[in-house]
Image: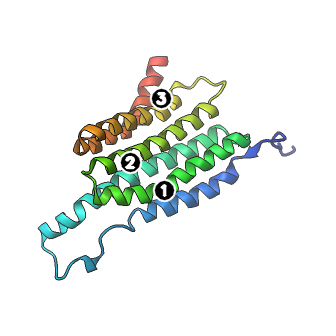
Amino acid sequence: MGVTLPQVGLFEMRRLEMLSNTIFGVAMTLLAYDLPKASSFTQAPTWIGLINVYAHPVIALTISFIVAGLFWFSHHRRLAVAPEGGRGVVFLNLFFLLAIIILPVTNGLYGVYRLDGVIAVLYGFHLTVIAALNALLWILALRGQSNPQLLATAVFPLFVFVLGTAMAFIEPKVAQFTWCLAFGAPLAGWLAARRAT
């Protein structure tokens, strides 16, 4: 039995997997970098003082960490579904990973200025770009296949982040709750699979 070689011009996506693990790991760790340090306090803080200082950054960190984790999971599933890709798909994956690298920057801004309309829209736009790249990569990976569950799971967060970003223009406080609906992507996939049968 011989080893199956990839077609000429195709890239083995498992090589990208090691790079993406590193990028996701570093980006998800750096999310905590902007949390206030102990030096923010001149004396031992009260419970109210802790809440006032940490509430917004921890909310932003939690949202970003879960979003990054979900996209990491989606990314690895996609690489398993399409183990080879052309040059265009590889570069699109690199842009997707670039968007993940920038997540600690927008998360830091959002953690400090969460209720500011401009920052909420910027953060939402960034989440939308990540979701759009992920959805596009899934569409390319599923070409020629009929898998409504995977497609719905990939596209659902894009619609949620677009809606949440539009909400950030109107009411930044509500946007964070809208973005959390993206965590329902597995449910959307399950419903699409049931509807297809």
**Mark 1 closeness class: few <14, some 14–19, many ≥20 residues within 10 Å:** few
Discs 1, 2 touching: Cβ within 8 Å: no
Disc marking residue 62: none
74 vs 137, nearest the viewer:
137
Residue at the farthest front position: 118
Q: Nearer the viewer, mark 3 or mark 1?
A: 1
Three-letter code for the amino acid on which mark 2 is drawn: Leu
Mark 1 vs mark 2: which is more N-terminal?
1
Nearer to us: label 3 or label 2? 2
Q: Quadrant of residue 175?
A: top left
Position of 140 with respect to 152 (left or right) is right
Which of the labelled discs sits on residue 152, or is there none?
A: 3
Residue type, label 1: Ile
Taking the view exactly as shown, the residue that stands out farthest to the right is: 2
Q: Quadrant of residue 46?
A: bottom left
Residue 102, numbered circle: 1
Q: As shown in the figure, which amino acid type bears the numbered disc 3?
A: Ala
Indicate the secondary structure of the residue bearing disc 3: helix
CA gap between label 3 and label 2 equals 25 Å
Binning the other alpha carbons within 10 Å of mark 3 as few (below 14), some (14 to 19) or many (20 upward) gives many
How far is disc 1 from disc 2 in space, using C-alphas?
Answer: 12 Å
The residue pinned by badge 2 equals 122
Q: How is the image coloured?
A: rainbow
Which residue is at 63% across, 43% downward?
92
| Residue shown at the point (35%, 39%) measured from the top left | 165
Q: Position of residue 197 (x, y in %)?
A: 49, 17
* Residue 197 visible here: no
The image position of residue 58, as x and y in percent, is 29, 60
Q: Is residue 122 visible?
A: yes
User: What secondary structure is found at the residue carrying circle 2?
Assistant: helix
Left or right side of 1 for 116: left
